[in-house]
Image: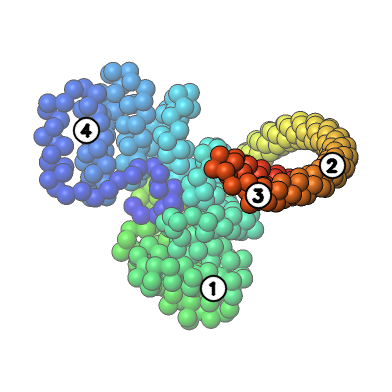
Amino acid sequence: MKTFFLLLTVFAAPFAWAEKKEIDSLESLLACSSIVERIDKLNELAYLYGERDYKKGLQLANQALKIARELGDTLQIVKAGRATSYFFRRLNQLDSALTLGSELLPQARKKGFVVELKSILNGLAYVTILNANYDKALMYLFESLEIRKRDGDKFEISVALHNIGLVYYKLGNTGTALEYYQEALSLKNQTDNKYDLDLLLVNIGLCYAYSNLCREATRYIDDGFSKCNNNCSDDRLVQGFLGYGIILFHEDEYSKAEKQFLKSYTLAKKVEAERFQLENIIWLSKIYIHDNKLAAAEKYLVEAEEIIQKNSPFKLELIGIYEQFFKLYQKKEDFKKISIYQAKYISLKDSIFNDEVTKNLMKAEAEFQERENRSRIESQNKILTLKEEVIYRQKVANASMGGIAFLVIILTVILARNNRQKQLRNKLLDEQVKERTKELEMNSNALQRAVQERYVLISEASSDIQSSIATLKGLCFLGSKEIDHPLATEYWKQLDNTSNGLSAVLNKMRYSAHKPLE
């Protein structure tokens, strides 16, 4: 049975198609597996059968659950029970699915099996929505939403929001439904996982269609169809054509609306979507009763009654069917049948929308809002604590910066003082160098004057001696001419050589005295 609530099973059971050899391989391993391994293999096999054979899947999941119960392994019980509950839902054994899910829920909560808990909550919500127990469905879905928000996965949060929107849509509260839908759409657009984005857009379009906002409804349904590239599944087409029909109905285009409803109804029968068969029959009967085509209206309403007799769980749609029966027999003036269907209509409506349900709905919303507020307060307290910690750290940082700045100032003062002292020392040193240089210059000048005076003295002495030597040489020359004696000549010659040597010595002394000091 394929239904409008497709998203509610996204996380309920991650079934995948597999090749036959994969199934055969698992089945061959069952015989040689330990007890715990056998449970896992049975669960895997149940998943692999998936959409192909629900009865076989249920049989395998039940075997796994039985072994898990015998072992008393809570985790395995929850895992196998989750799979078993899924197949109960697919086989339309909703009471069994609800009983088993209700048994598993407290165990999953107590042990903190988060993945299984989310799946069980979605499964219970699925069943309670079909049974029109919307107060319980909201309680399960709000709990599921809280878990997903703690995990922080935007895609999963968007799925939970989408499911909550579905409940409000079923309740006829399209304003609240659109709030959850739009929030889900915003989150889904922030993720790379666009799974069932087309379904969400079509559901938003249906919501606008029921609110008689035809332009917005058309835009979203068109957008939803574009997401599946005009190759949409029959399930999507069923919902889209229904939406188009509602839009045309509100625009008083009854003939065009009838064509859209018939297209949706035909596809709904093809995919065995009983809920949409009923909804299309409701709208078709409205058109036929309006156009006084009472035989056509009765024909479709009788078909709906045949679906109802199969213990169909779609109670909200049943209310609409009974209402159309009531209006049909009003026009036919069949007062007996008017009384019968009026009683059915009132009884079923009162069972769904009684005071207790209303109170429970309000309670579920209030508890969720209270938990949300507590969560916000906790978040705000954490933010305040973090702010205080940041402020404290900022104060510490400011104090550290102040201390560093103070040290820098002190260091700057010390460096400036040292620099001034260095400059003063350099100045004093320069003055001392200048004084010393001046003193050296004075000494040098004095020495130069002394050397000059020495040179003068030496020059004068040398001149006097040279004059005496010249006189002596002259006398020696005259003596050698007057006295012609070999011995005397030798003396005169030695005396002349001595005079020449003395004259050379005097010349060296004059040169040394004239040479400047180095």
Q: Mark 4 against mark 2, which lies toward the viewer?
A: 2
Residue 31 in sight: yes
User: Compared with residue 342, is residue 208 higher up or lower down, i.e. above or below?
Assistant: below
- Image coords of residue 475 (percent x, y): 71, 48
Instruction: Mark yes or no: residue 392 visible.
Output: no
x and y percentages locating residue 387 in the rendered image = 74, 36
Query: What secondary structure is found at the residue carrying circle 4?
Result: helix
Nearer the N terminus, badge 4 or badge 1?
4
Amino acid tagged 2: Ala
Nearest-to-viewer mark from 3 and 4:
3
Q: Which residue is mark 1?
A: 219
Going from N to C along the chain, the mark reached first, 1 or 2, is 1
Residue linked to disc 3? 482
Q: Tags 2 and 3 in contact by the CB under 8 Å rule?
A: no
Could you give the CA–CA distance between mark 4 and mark 1, rounded to whole angstroms?
47 Å
Camera-side residue of 485 and 452: 485
Viewer-side label of 3, 1: 3
Foreground pick, 461 / 272:
461
Residue nearer the viewer, 56 or 190: 190
